[in-house]
Image (cartoon, rainbow, N blue to C red):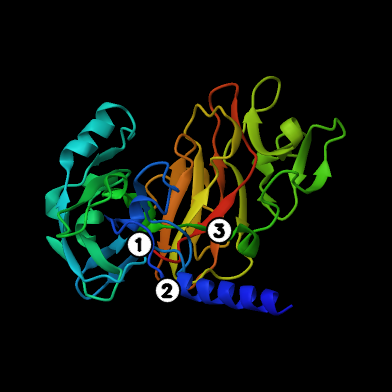
Amino acid sequence: MKQSIIIILLLSLWACKKDKDNYGIANIYMPQALNVSGGINANYAVPTGTDSSTYNYHIDASAGKLNIILGVAQASTYKSEGFTANIVTDADTINLLKFNNILDNKTILMPTSIYTLPGTVTVPAGKSEATFYLSLDIDQLKSADYQGKKLALAVRLQNAGKYEIASNAAVTIVIVDVDALVIGPSKDITSQYLKNTSTPFKVAGMHPGGRWGTLSDWITNTAAKSHDGFGGYASDEGGTIDMESGWGSPAIHNGKIWQTTGTALPAGTYTLDVSDLDWQGTKDPTYIVVAPGLDTIPDYGDVNGNTTIQYTLFSSPKITFTLATETKVTVGFAANYIQDQQGFKIYSVKLMNYPKHL
């Protein structure tokens, strides 16, 4: 018994001593080169996440800067004596990734005019890490030159004094999705403001033939009810919002389907997205419409050139719009089919909001 107690005490003392031991190799690395991809690659997407706990940047509105969070750290538990590492950029790495098609054709080398980066980062004695920022000019980010683009920059650590740089985590490939920053990240708010927006759609009535119907919660004008008084809905492919003519169906002139939000939208930036299509076979210009402050959409002939609304064609089925004040919004579709055999079938209508954007 006494011998067992002595062994337990010795093990406890050894464990306490072990806890105080330093371990690991005191190499210097960039956490962002590993943390996002889990070490699969060094890509660091900006933005990442959709709320304040996961954003990887800060906005300095007074300076007009977007500060992307980067850092340096020591990999072991040894007490740091402090060190300073150089920070450089590496255009050759980006060019090589593009040459090998690892970065897509929307990704370009970040222009030097758009960013600032410190030349060094210092970790004081007794600390194991420090943060620094890649600062981007917000006004330049909003330039039409970068719309739809991603900006890539390789940020590399060099020369950390007495400590070695970990070669497999020395460089971070910062990839800035300009559109996602300027108008995103997005949040789906469809169910808060619109009704009956995705398959299986609810119908207020069906044609005796069983294929054509009229949507609940949407207003469909007489012209769009082109199938013996029914229209706006087809049972095809599980049910779609539909307006089509030809193949034995009558022509549709000034056909309209619309819905007004149940409550006012707050001031902000939004996108109406109807890209979830089963079929888009419009030949004559057919409009997707956003009408702020109205309880209907204009007649077909009053859409084109109307500055009180926003609209697009089905070939580009998204509308991004900004509300300066709280207001109800009407969304819908307007068609005037002159040519034979055309139409569209929509699986879902989405309303997106951008609670954090530049």
Q: Circle 2 is placed at which residue position?
A: 20
Residue at the (34%, 33%) spot, across then down:
104
Identify residue for label 1.
76
Specify the quadrant that holds the C terminus: bottom left
Residue at 43%, 67% (x, y): give it: 268
Residue 167 left/right relative to 281: left
Real-space Cα distance between discs 1 and 3? 59 Å
Please tell me the numbered disc located at residue 330. 3
- Specify whether residue 309 is in view: no
Could you tell whether 121 is left or right of 251 in the image?
left
Which is more toward the observer, 277 or 178? 178
- In the picture shown, does residue 289 fall above or below 224? below
Mark 2 → mark 3, Cα distance in angstroms = 67 Å
Q: How far across and down, in percent of the image, does residue 297 sit?
A: 54, 53
Between 211 and 356, the one nearer to me in the picture: 356
- Tag in front: 2 or 3: 2
**Secondary structure at numbered mark 1:** loop
> Which amino acid type corresponds to the residue marked 3 in the rendered image?
Thr
